[in-house]
Image: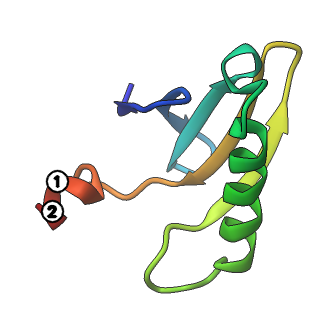
Amino acid sequence: MLGRGSFGIVKLAINKKLNAHFAVKCLPKKGIQGNKHVEHVINERQILMKLKGNAFCCTMVDTFQDEKSLYIVMEYLSGGELIKHIR
């Protein structure tokens, strides 16, 4: 586990064939239903799609879902959370 947020957790995934690391944001569907959380997740995905290739944002690789959760796969950037560096 790399981190925990308001909606879910971020885990480290390793593709052994490519020897590549990815950050996978796991969002339980039960936790985002209702209020404006669904809209927030949709907006996050759309923004990451628009910023693909931007030097100032991590790259979203893929998104998918199963019966229980939504997943956002992003490039893994070591160094901790951005908010830690901003403070």
Q: In the rendered view, does 74 fall on the left or right side of 47? A: left
Determine the residue located farthest toward the right in the rendered image.
67
Residue 21 in view here: yes
Amino acid at the residue labelled 2: His
Mark 1: secondary structure: helix
Are there few (<14), some (14-19), or many (20+) residues within 10 Å of tag 2?
few
Q: Are marks 2 and 1 in contact (CB under 8 Å)?
A: yes
Determine the residue located farthest toward the left in the rendered image.
87
Q: Quadrant of residue 59?
A: bottom right
Q: In the rendered view, does 59 fall on the left or right side of 79? A: right
Amino acid at the residue labelled 1: Lys
63 in relation to 14, above or below = below
Expressed as whole percent of the image width and height from the top left, the position of residue 23 reads: 51, 44
Q: Quadrant of the C terminus?
A: bottom left
Q: Quadrant of the N terminus?
A: top left
Residue at 65 percent of width and 47 percent of height: 73
Q: In the rendered view, does 59 fall on the left or right side of 62? A: left
The residue identified by callout 2 is: 85
Expressed as whole percent of the image width and height from the top left, the position of residue 40 reads: 68, 48
Which of the pair 34/73 is nearer the observer? 34
The residue identified by callout 1 is: 84
Residue 15 in view here: no
